[in-house]
Image (spheres, helix red, strand yellow):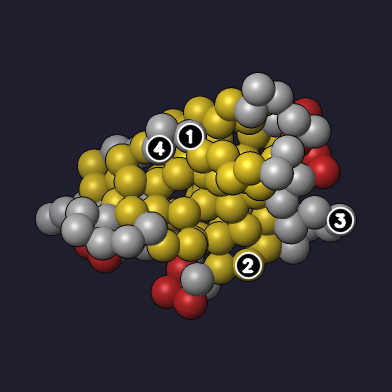
């Protein structure tokens, strides 16, 4: 079955960087569009970024453009989210997400806290 395991979250100061990882299994990773979403306390789930199939293009929520980079390592079945210049507004639990076999799947998430 589809399995997604996120890691890399931590508590950091504003301006610092983190790289999140999502190890995937149970589907043809290289040929599926993958996304990152996040949920801050008391807020709804928010789309952050997607890595699109058929190439190397990624899309981002406006406030992540220029700071975040999403990429895949197909040899490791792993999706990454490089986050630079973090702000307190980036504090949330981050999940990777895939639509596979007619169902939306996401992992347990990894917590990112940005605080001075």
Which label's residue is closer to the chain start, 2 or 3? 3
> Dot 2: what SS?
strand
Q: Residue at x 51, y 39 (%)?
A: 106
Spatial CA distance of label 3 from label 1 is 24 Å
Q: Mark 4: which secondary structure?
A: loop
**Residue 9 placement: quadrant:** top left
**Residue 83 in picture, x, y percent from top left:** 45, 54
Circles 3 and 1, Cβ within 8 Å, touching? The answer is no
Residue assigned mark 3:
54
Q: Earlier in the sequence, mark 1 or mark 2?
A: 2
Q: Which residue is mark 4?
A: 109
Disc 3 is placed on an element classified as: loop
Measuring 84% from the left and 57% from the top, which residue is drawn there? 55
Residue 92, how many percent across, how many down? Answer: 30, 52
Q: Is residue 46 left or right of residue 76?
A: left
Between discs 4 and 2, the one toward the N terminus: 2
Binning the other alpha carbons within 10 Å of mark 2 as few (below 14), some (14 to 19) or many (20 upward) gives some
- Pinpoint residue 54: horizontal percent, then vertical percent: 86, 56
Q: Which residue is mark 2?
A: 59
The numbered mark, 3 or 4, whose residue comes first in the sequence reads 3
Q: Nearer the viewer, mark 4 or mark 2?
A: 4
Residue drawn at x 70%, y 44% as measured from the top left: 102
Q: Is residue 54 left or right of residue 48?
A: right
Of tags 1 and 2, the one toward the viewer is 1
- Name the residue located 55 percent from the left edge and 31 percent from the top edge: 4
Horizontal side of residue 9 vs 47, given as left or right = left
Q: Which residue is mark 1?
A: 107
Q: What distance separates the C-alpha of mark 4 from that of mark 1?
A: 5 Å
Question: In the picture, residue 105 is in which quadrant?
Answer: top right
What is the count of numbered marks? 4
Say the numbered circle drawn on residue 84: none
29 up-or-down from 92: above or below: above
């Amino acid at each position: 079955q589809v399995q997604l395991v996120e890691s890399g979250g931590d508590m950091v100061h504003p301006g610092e960087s983190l790289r999140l990882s999502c190890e995937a299994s149970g589907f043809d990773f290289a040929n599926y569009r993958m996304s990152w979403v996040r949920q801050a306390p008391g807020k709804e789930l928010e789309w952050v970024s997607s890595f699109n199939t058929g190439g190397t293009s990624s899309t981002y929520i406006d406030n992540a453009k220029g700071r975040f980079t999403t990429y895949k390592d197909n040899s490791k079945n792993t999706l990454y989210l490089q986050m630079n210049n973090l702000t307190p507004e980036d504090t949330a639990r981050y999940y990777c997400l895939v639509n596979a076999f007619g169902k939306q799947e996401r992992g347990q998430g990894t917590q990112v806290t940005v605080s001075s």
